[in-house]
């Protein structure tokens, strides 16, 4: 089958047999042909659902203490060199205030798995944000919790939860995480989050150590089961103080092809052009948008702590004030041909326009 008909089938059926997915993902010897077809179709589909709108999410990295020891991550528990910090409730609310004034209508609270933030404290933070900014969505990204904890945060007003599955292959998962973590547990968390009623975001790293094309296809199959609202992917980037310091970073073009494949398989999805993508290439996020992404997540964390949320080496946007980041991202989005909107930016499951319109 020709590359063009594979891409057309993917668009029409939102699915392809494994062998065809493998051809598109690897695109061995036909990268230009595959990418031309993928990016063109992905951009048309994203415009059907979302026009040229790009949603912004204000990222507040509120703690880098973490009880987990994910081998790839710079803030893992075992990294004794990491300088740890936590934001107070007042500092978090100050980030939201600044963000609201800059036009953010979603706040993403992300952190390590930090027991100092009890469920009571998280619920208090969430309800204070929702009381002050009832027109905003609160997204949490705090890792693996019990059903009851997820439920408590939801009842306190949290709307969305981000938890990447990282890899859907159990053996690969074990090579990236210590023995006390499991893929089963992570999947259970995701299904709990969904059942409770959150908009759910998941995703995986591209080019993580030992990842194969077959693993990536398993990731796509898992996403088909979960049907998440948001799908975040970004390149693995090595961190000097982890056991993976000598591994190569994920490849830009593999990420871009996967973004386009995700857009065609999940046309409704919220798909960010991630900071990691912008880290491996100066125009990575712009290219991501052109390949089908429709969300960007600028940083609202206080400048003095930005460098310490050190997931991987070379992370961008650690020095500029939120207002400057906002202007910078606006320019980048416009240069790519899209437009940032001041909007809560919910998922559009049925956004497709009729053919020909
Ligand atoms: N504790 C939260 C937040 C983790 S950080 C949680 O468990 O969900 C957010 C994401 O950063 C992770 O899900 C992971 O996919 C990504 N990340 C961590 N280390 C990385 C690295 N070295 N390169 C690229 N992405 C990384």
Image: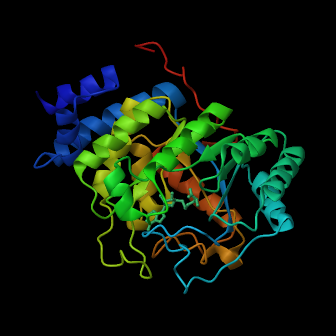
Residue 68 appears left or right of 36: right
In the displayed structure, 267 sits above or below 210; it is: above
One can see residue 281 in this view: no
Q: Residue at x 69, y 65 (%)?
A: 322
One can see residue 227 in this view: yes
**Relative image position of residue 228 (x, y in whole percent):** 51, 35
Occupied quadrant, residue 18: top left
In the displayed structure, 213 sits above or below 135; it is: below
Occupied quadrant, residue 11: top left
Q: Residue at x 38, y 44 (%)?
A: 259
Q: Nearer the viewer, residue 270 or 181?
A: 181
Q: Quarter of the image containing the C terminus? A: top left
In the displayed structure, 167 sits above or below 268; it is: below
Q: Residue at x 17, y 46 (%)?
A: 27
Q: Nearer the viewer, residue 268 or 222?
A: 222
Q: Nearer the viewer, residue 171 or 353?
A: 171
**Relative image position of residue 291 (x, y in whole percent):** 38, 43
Occupied quadrant, residue 197: top right
Q: Quarter of the image containing the N terminus? A: top left
**Relative image position of residue 133 (x, y in whole percent):** 84, 45
Residue 65 appears left or right of 152: left
Residue 133 appears left or right of 48: right
Residue 164 appears left or right of 246: right
> Which residue is at the far front?
180
């Amino acid at each position: 089958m020709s590359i063009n008909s594979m891409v057309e089938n993917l668009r029409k059926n939102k699915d392809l047999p494994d062998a065809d997915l493998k051809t598109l993902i690897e695109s061995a010897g036909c990268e230009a042909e595959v990418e031309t077809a993928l990016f063109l179709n992905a951009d048309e589909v994203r415009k059907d659902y979302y026009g040229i709108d790009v949603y912004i999410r204000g990222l507040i990295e509120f703690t880098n203490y973490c009880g987990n020891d994910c081998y790839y991550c710079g803030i893992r528990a075992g990294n004794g060199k990491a300088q740890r910090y936590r934001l107070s409730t007042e500092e978090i609310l100050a980030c939201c205030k600044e963000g609201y004034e800059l036009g953010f209508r979603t706040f993403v609270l992300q952190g390590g798995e930090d027991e100092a933030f009890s469920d009571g404290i998280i619920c208090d933070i969430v309800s204070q944000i929702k009381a002050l900014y009832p027109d905003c969505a609160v997204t949490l990204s705090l890792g693996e919790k019990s059903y009851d904890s997820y439920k408590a945060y939801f009842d306190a007003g949290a709307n969305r939860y981000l938890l990447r599955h990282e890899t859907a292959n159990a053996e690969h998962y074990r090579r990236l995480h210590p023995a006390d973590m499991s893929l089963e547990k992570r999947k259970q968390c995701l299904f709990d989050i969904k059942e409770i009623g959150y908009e759910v975001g998941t995703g995986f790293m591209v080019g993580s150590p030992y990842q194969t094309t077959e693993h990536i296809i398993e990731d796509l199959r898992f996403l088909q089961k979960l049907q998440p609202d948001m799908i975040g992917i970004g390149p693995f980037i090595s961190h000097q103080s982890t056991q993976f310091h000598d591994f190569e970073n994920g490849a830009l073009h593999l990420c871009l092809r996967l973004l386009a494949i995700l857009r065609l398989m999940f046309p409704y999805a919220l798909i960010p052009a991630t900071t990691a993508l912008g880290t491996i290439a100066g125009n990575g996020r712009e290219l991501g948008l052109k390949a089908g992404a429709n969300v960007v997540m600028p940083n609202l964390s206080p400048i003095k702590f930005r460098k310490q949320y050190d997931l991987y080496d070379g992370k961008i946007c650690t020095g500029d004030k939120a207002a400057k980041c906002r202007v910078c991202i606006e320019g980048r989005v416009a240069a790519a041909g899209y437009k940032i909107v001041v909007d809560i930016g919910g998922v559009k499951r049925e956004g497709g326009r009729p053919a020909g319109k």
